[in-house]
Image (cartoon, grey):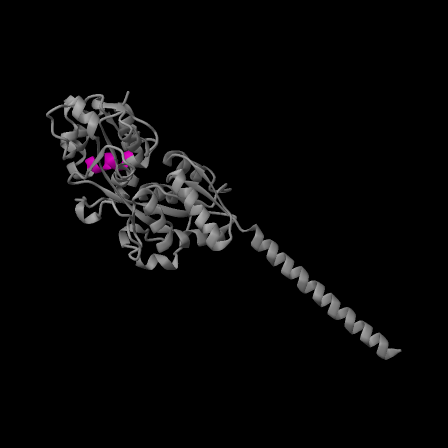
Amino acid sequence: MKKTMKNTLGIALVSVAALALLGCNEKNEKKEAKQEVKIYSIIHEEETEALCKLFTEKTGIPATFLRASTGELVNRVIAEKDNPQADILLGGATNYHIQANEKGALEQYKSPLAENVPQFAKSKDDTYTGFCVLSLGIGVNKKRFEEKFPGTEMPKTWEDLANPAFKGEIVLTNPVASSTAYLFVQDQLQRLGEEKGWEYLESLIPLVGQFPDSGSAPAKLIGTGEYALGVSYIHALAKYKADGFDVVAIAPPQSVGDVDCISIMKNTKNLDAAKKFVDFMLSKEAQELMSSIDFTLPVNPDAKGAEGSVPLSEIDLIEYDTARAAKEKDAVLSKWAQEVK
C-alpha cells in the first residue's frame, strides 16, 4: 500500500513538473509571439515596406510602420516620449535626432555593427546611428529647361541657381517640415557665413515656384517635368534618371552631406525587437537593399551602392557642423518663416 502511494505521489509530482514546464514553455512562446516593432518612417514608403518585409523574414518579428514627413514624426516622438506609440524613428538627418535626444525622447543603444560605421555617422552617446549617406544637389529636367531657357547653361553652382531668369521654375522643399530643405538652408549659412548666407537665401526665395512639405517632392516634380529646376538629394535624382526620366543630377561645389539615421524611442515597450531592427538596418544586406531601391550610399563599408549612384568621391562637401544646425534650428526656421510670406 505504501509502495503504491509512493509511486502515485511520484507520478503526480512528475506530472505537476511537466505541466509547470509546459506552462513555462507556453509563456516563453507567447512572449516571443508578442515581439513586434513599430516604426515611424521618414524614408519613402517603398523602401520602408521592403525593409520591414526583409526584417520579418530574417527574424520572424512583425514590423509595421507609419510614413510621414520629418517634422511631423519628430514632433510625435518628442510629444510621446513618456508613452511612445512606436519603437523606432527611421530616417531623418542627424540634427533631428539630436533635437529628439535633447528632449529626452531617445534610448541609448550601441549596435555591434556600429563599430565599423564612420565616426561622422553616429552619435557620441549612442542615441542614433546613420545607415546611409545623403548629399544635396541641383536637379534639372533637361527637356523643360531647354524649352524655357534656350541657349542658357544649366546651373553648376548654388550661385548659378539664384539666376533671376529662373523665377517660378524652381522647386524647394519647405524647411519647416522637411529635413532636406533645412539641410540646404544650413549649407548656405555654413559655407557663406550667416550674413552672406541669408543674403543668398533671400535672393533665392522669390524665385521658388513651390515649397512642398515632403523632401521627396522636388525630385518627383522635376522628373515629371512640372518644374525645370530644384534642390534635392542627389540619390533621389539618380533614381529618377535610372527610371528613364529626363533628369540631370548636378553636384555643385560646397554642398553638404549628412546621414539618414535610426534611433530607438525612450520607454519603448519593445526594446529587444527595436535593438534587432537597428542591427538589421546596419547590416550589409539591408543597406544594399535600400541602395538598390533609392540609390543611397551605404555607411556599412562592406555594402556596395547601386549601379548608377553618385559616389562620394565625386562630391565636394563642406565640413558640416551638425551640432550647430541642431542648436540654431528654431531661430533659423523662425527667420525663414518671416522671409516666406
Give x and y (percent) for residue 79: 45, 37
Tell me the residue at 40%/38% (across/down): 45
Observer-nearest residue: 82 or 297?
297
Residue at left offset 28%, top offset 54%: 119
Drawn side of residue 32 relative to residue 108, left or right? right
In depth, the one of 154 and 281 nearer the eye is 154
Quarter of the figure with residue 213: top left
The residues colored magenta run: 181-189
Q: Which residue is situated farthest in the bottom direction here?
A: 3
User: Residue 271: percent from the left, percent from the top?
Assistant: 49, 52
Q: Is residue 161 above or below residue 275?
A: above
Q: Name which residue lies at 85% across and 76% down.
A: 4
Picture coordinates of residue 187, whole percent (x, y): 21, 38
Q: Position of residue 228 (x, y in %)?
A: 22, 26
Residue extending furthest toward the front: 244
Count of picture labels: 0
Whether residue 265 appears in this view of the structure is: no
Q: Residue at x 57, y 50 (%)?
A: 34
- Residue 185 in the magenta stretch? The answer is yes
For the residue pair 204 and 248, the one nearer the viewer reads as 248
Residue 30 can be seen in this image? yes
**Most common SS among magenta residues:** helix
Residue 25 highlighted magenta (yes or no): no
